[in-house]
Amino acid sequence: MSLQKTSCDDRINLVGDDPVARSSNLRDAARVLHAVETGSRGPATPPALRQFGALYGSSAVMCALYEQVDKVAGTDAPVLICGESGTGKELLAQTLHSRSSRKAAPFIPVNCGAVSAQLSESELFGHEKGSFTGAHQRHIGYFERACGGTLFLDEVTEMPPEMQVKLLRVLETGTFYRVGGTEQIKADVRIIAATNRALDSAVQSGDFREDLMYRLAVVPLCMPPLREREEDIVLLAQHFLAQLNTQHGSAKTLSRMALNLLREQPWRGNVRELKNAILRAYILSDQTLTIEPQCRQRTSDPVLTSEGCLQIAVGMPLAEAQRALIVATLEHCEGNKRDAAERLGISLKTLYNRLALYDSQTIPAAA
């Protein structure tokens, strides 16, 4: 069969004498003609989950982060990663390491909150035999183990104050001594630190040295919370489910209700909470996964309205704060949706779409 499209009337001519072939050709031609006339190229391809090093995400905030990582990874500048618990700060640190010139050398993670104050110096810098009671042999610390590579200091604000002074000294001189040693050792490592606290608050409270903060935060990076990456939520859930299916040789799927619920939950525990929710649903469900709305069963943060003002507690999830603002504005406009949309700076259609998600809340009738 050959298809010929004329330039005059966009008709498709069929060439072929076999009746059976002609019948088949007619069906094929009809499909082609429909595609030509409508511009259709078949069903839309669903968005794919982008992988970038150890990170996954296709949202705008994640793509912007990937661009920053590409610029920073090739340098030895200290990086400070901020972000809530469960966002994937260590995965970001691993990605920085894997895309750097140090990728063939070790990546050594250290949880600063898990190292005792008494042993922190020995753990970081090592010690010589006999340097203190119980030091029966030489111990190589994290700095030496990470030689040529990357040392990741997780929860760095939990580091004891006396160790902060010693770490600052190493960052300034690029050298250190083992406990009880006299040999000066070069600190050939790239430092990446992370915290889930606001560093300014830690400095103001006296828990963290201001000069060390400036040394570590040469390049600050922020891992966005999951509620700011709404486009990634379903993609990540499907990714985690695919991993479980591959691991266990199953073919479980997510129900439509589960997908809707995944989009609506606040995910205060971020990606870690989402991953655990999928694992829990996988274990408890048969072929189709259902998600329990456990994350929404909590006491809401206080929202106060008074004389046209809205007071929202610091730390309230963004989705809940947005909902409170929309509802309060609508009440202030006495239920006039068009007026409320104008005040909020959104289209009337967007407001209706948002209210459809808030159907469990009492909304004033339209004026």
Image (spheres, rainbow, N blue to C red):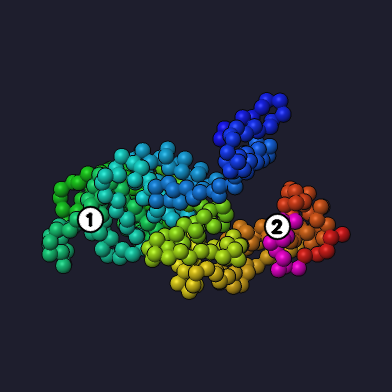
Vertical side of 225 occupied by 18: above or below: above
Residue 128: mark: none
Residue 354: mark: 2
Q: Residue at x 49, y 72 (%)?
A: 286
- In magenta segment, residue 16: no
Q: Nearer the viewer, residue 273 or 252?
A: 252
Badge 1 marks a residue whose secondary structure is loop
Q: Could you tell me the amino acid type at mark 1? A: Gly
Chain part drawn in magenta: 352-362
Q: Earlier in the sequence, mark 2 or mark 1?
A: 1
Q: Nearer the viewer, residue 288 or 307?
A: 288
Q: Residue 213: image x %, image y %?
A: 41, 49
| In-image side of 344 versus 91 (left or right) | right
- Quadrant of the frame with the C terminus: bottom right
Q: Residue at x 30, y 65 (%)?
A: 116
Q: Mark 1 packing: few (<14 Cα in 10 Å), some, or many (20+)?
A: some
Q: Residue at x 77, y 65 (%)?
A: 363
| In-image side of 50 versus 256 (left or right) | left
Q: Nearer the viewer, residue 96 or 214?
A: 96
